[in-house]
């Protein structure tokens, strides 16, 4: 994130841009609309971020930083890398579920060259998977980078299509967990079982 984001006006621009990019995508977002929402002129926006793409990169960097902060604050109980992987995946899912704009931005970031901002979240999973391989708990034939990226895709894919998935799901009983909770558990189980050496 550029150092300029400590400036109140720059922060307002990023907040307005995050909403606009999440709602309309990179191609559909309008710099004029972002400037209007932020209460600044377009020239100031370009002064801080140089281009629409530069602004988009700042939005992605801020969003990725929020995710990384949430994951860094996790407290892990005693346990091996697979248990920490399970907790990290569940926390990542919950963070994304609470931040639908970030889910929308992730989809835009990959098409607009900004996906690298989320590398720290993926690398956190890579480290846990590699540690598990070193301890014999994760299969040796698992590519940690690919497995970590697939886990993120599984979460973002569900959250992007939750309404569609909900229409095809059987009705829930009053005592059943929500579809989102069931999906989170199933997604975490799928990843952990898929990489486990046992």
Image (tube, rainbow, N blue to C red):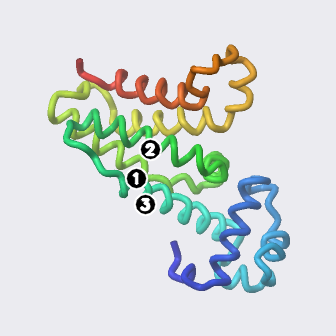
Q: Residues within 10 Å of mark 2 (few under 14, many from 20)?
A: some
Residue pointed to by mark 1: 71
Instruction: Give the CA distance from mark 1 to mark 2.
Output: 7 Å
Pinpoint residue 174: horizontal percent, then vertical percent. Answer: 63, 20
Question: Residue at the spot x=81%, y=56% of the render?
Answer: 28
Decide if residue 10 is on the left or right side of residue 39: left
Q: Position of residue 7 (x, y in %)?
A: 59, 85
Q: SS at mark 2?
A: helix
- The residue sitting at the top extreme is 170
Q: Position of residue 48 (x, y in %)?
A: 64, 82
Contact between marks 1 and 2 (CB within 8 A): the answer is: yes
* Between discs 1 and 2, the one toward the N terminus: 1
Residue at image point 70% right, 25% down: 166
| Label pair 2/3, CB-CB below 8 angstroms | no
Distance of mark 1 from mark 3, alpha carbons? 5 Å
**To which residue does mark 2 refer?**
91
Question: In the rendering, which numbered label is found on residue 80?
Answer: none
In 3D space, how far apart are the residues under numbered discs 2 and 3 (Cα atoms)? Answer: 11 Å
Name the spot of residue 107 as percent of width and height, x first. 64, 45
Assess whether mark 3 and mark 1 are in contact (beta carbons under 8 angstroms): yes
Q: Which residue is mark 3?
A: 69
Q: Secondary structure at mark 3?
A: helix
């Amino acid at each position: 994130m550029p150092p300029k984001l400590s400036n109140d006006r720059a922060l307002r621009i990023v907040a307005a841009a995050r909403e606009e990019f999440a709602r309309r995508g990179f191609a559909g977002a309008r710099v004029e609309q972002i400037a209007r929402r932020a209460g600044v002129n377009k020239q100031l926006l370009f002064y801080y971020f140089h281009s629409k793409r530069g602004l988009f990169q700042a939005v992605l960097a801020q969003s990725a930083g929020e995710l990384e902060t949430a994951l860094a604050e996790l407290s892990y109980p005693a346990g091996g890398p697979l248990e920490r992987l399970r907790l990290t995946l569940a926390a990542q899912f919950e963070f994304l579920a609470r931040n639908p704009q970030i889910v929308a931005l992730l989809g835009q970031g990959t098409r607009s060259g900004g996906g690298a901002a989320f590398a720290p979240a993926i690398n956190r999973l890579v480290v846990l998977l590699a540690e598990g391989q070193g301890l014999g708990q994760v299969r040796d034939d698992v590519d940690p980078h690919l497995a970590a990226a697939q886990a993120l895709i599984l979460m973002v894919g569900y959250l992007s299509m939750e309404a569609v998935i909900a229409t095809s799901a059987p009705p829930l009983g009053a005592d059943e967990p929500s579809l989102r909770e069931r999906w989170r558990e199933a997604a975490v189980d799928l990843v952990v079982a898929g990489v486990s050496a046992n």
